[in-house]
Image (spheres, rainbow, N blue to C red):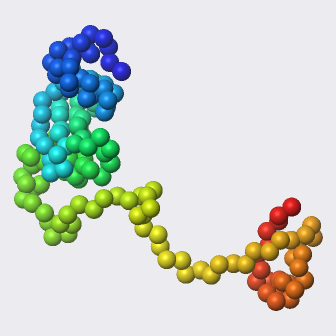
Amino acid sequence: MSTILRTLRNLRKIGIKEYGHQLQNIGDTKAGTLIATDGFGNKYYENLEQELPLRTRWVDYKDAEFQPDHISPGWHAWMSYMVDKPPTQDKLLQTGLREWEPKEHKANFTASRSAYKPYSTCDKAEVFPMDARGQAKDMNTQRRVGRENAVFVDRR
């Protein structure tokens, strides 16, 4: 959180509407220069004078429910201080897509119902209850499956 003096100074610079928007989304008030807007509609800002080191760059996401993959690799490098120039000023990134880059962005479905699940080639092991000596309680199960092929689980 910032000091009261810094908060009031930023409130005067950015206005009430932007002040409320920043408190809702990033939890702090920041005033800086707009560097550029990317293809997703995210706005990238920078303030080198009044911010703490390594907190001088920030992004204002277009949507309220943002994902980390909504930042392109060039902007991620700039936000992480890996490069000094933003992608709009970098000659290499302005050349366009390279042949190995995907043509369109694919969303990250990790931890969702659409996440990739590999096909399992392992058979489901049979699980049988066992007694205190580690033997199957059902003798028919021991004869049918064989002791070496069964997986025993203690269900006391």
From this viewpoint, is residue 101 visible? no
From this viewpoint, is residue 34 visible? yes
Q: In front: 70, or 16?
A: 16
Q: Residue at x 90, y 69 (%)?
A: 131
Residue at the farthest right position: 133
Q: Position of residue 92 (x, y in %)?
A: 10, 55
Q: Position of residue 67 (x, y in %)?
A: 33, 48
Residue at the farthest front position: 17
Q: Give the quarter of the image for residue 32.
A: top left
Q: In front: 117, or 24?
A: 24
Q: Is residue 114 left or right of residue 150?
A: left
Q: Give the quarter of the image for residue 145.
A: bottom right
Residue 27 higher or lower than 43, as above or below: above
In the rendered image, which quarter contains the N terminus?
Answer: top left
Q: In front: 34, or 98?
A: 34
Q: Position of residue 19 (x, y in %)?
A: 24, 23
Instruction: Count how many numbered circles sit on residues in the image.
Output: 0
Q: Give the quarter of the image for residue 28.
A: top left
Q: Residue at x 23, y 53 (%)?
A: 73
Residue at the farthest top position: 5
Q: Is residue 36 left or right of residue 111?
A: left
Q: In front: 85, or 111?
A: 111
Q: Residue at x 32, y 29 (%)?
A: 24
Residue 61 higher or lower than 72, as above or below: above
Q: Residue at x 34, y 58 (%)?
A: 108
In the rendered image, which quarter contains the C terminus?
Answer: bottom right
